Amino acid sequence: MRSMTRGARRAAAAAVLLVAVGSAAACTPDPGMAPATTTTTTTSTTTTTIPTYTVPRTTLQAGSFSASVPSVNVSYLGCGGTYNPPAVTFNGPSVNIPAQTIQGAGVVTLPNVSATLAAASVNLSSFRLSCGFLSYSTGVTLEYSAVTASPSATVNLDNGAVSIGSTTLRINGKLKFPGLGGLSVNLPGFNVTVPGFGATVPLN
């Protein structure tokens, strides 16, 4: 095989150089194009758990309290007078907390709490009714009907401490005068205020 002439060798070298330059140009990115980027976003999720407590059905007893009773006009066998009752001591009402489930923390409201003052009969002072030469003496009894109210109430879910707010009750009743032939006089309705108080209930 004969050797290539000098001119043929130069032509071959030039062809190789053109191929190399073309390949380099094909691999060089366009300076006007931005490089592709990939962005990964991670979302953080926070879960908050609200504690749940069970309050058992509970009955609390409010303390006794005193209240004034309205005066009434009394008439018997032609004699008349006014009876002014002394302050009356009432047994405190029963406060009922229904069983319920509560979610929250700290001090929260206790719903559906009721206070019931049971019907009762209370002996009061004596009363003397006089006119002219006539005089009648008798004991006096207050009889009143049951009454229910809805006091405000809260519970501390950290320790079970319950706070019952003061409550206004509307009393309806009558005064009975057994020494005056069993005379009975209806009282006008009157309000009494039961003081608030605190207690503790178990929580589950």
Image (spheres, grey):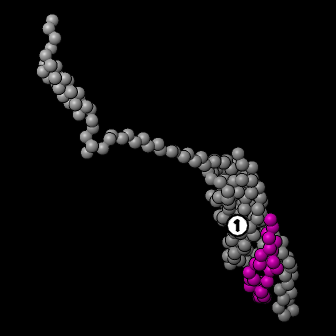
Above or below 154: residue 44: above
Picture quadrant where residue 127 is located: bottom right
In the image, taking residue 101 as reference, residue 177 lies left or right, namely right
Residue under the point 63% across and 48% down:
51
In the image, taking residue 41 as reference, residue 61 lies left or right, namely right
Q: Which residue is mark 1?
A: 165
Picture quadrant where residue 7 is located: top left
The x, y position of residue 42, in whole percent, is 47, 42
Boundaries of the magenta span: 63-90
Confirm whether residue 178 shows in the render: no
The x, y position of residue 101, in whole percent, is 63, 49
Query: Which part of the image, by quadrant, shows the N terminus?
Result: top left
Amino acid, disc 1:
Gly
Picture quadrant where residue 105 is located: bottom right
Residue under the point 47% across and 44% down:
43
In the image, taking residue 111 as reference, residue 13 lies left or right, namely left
Query: Which part of the image, by quadrant, shows the C terminus?
Result: top right
In the image, taking residue 11 as reference, residue 161 lies left or right, namely right
Residue under the point 69% across and 76% down:
190
Above or below 198: residue 177: below
The x, y position of residue 128, in whole percent, is 85, 84
Mark 1 Cα shell of 10 Å, populated few (<14), some (14-19), many (≥20): some
Confirm whether residue 128 shows in the render: yes
Q: Is residue 30 magenta?
A: no
The x, y position of residue 111, in whole percent, is 62, 58
Q: Nearer the viewer, residue 99 or 24?
A: 24
Q: Nearer the viewer, residue 58 or 158?
A: 158
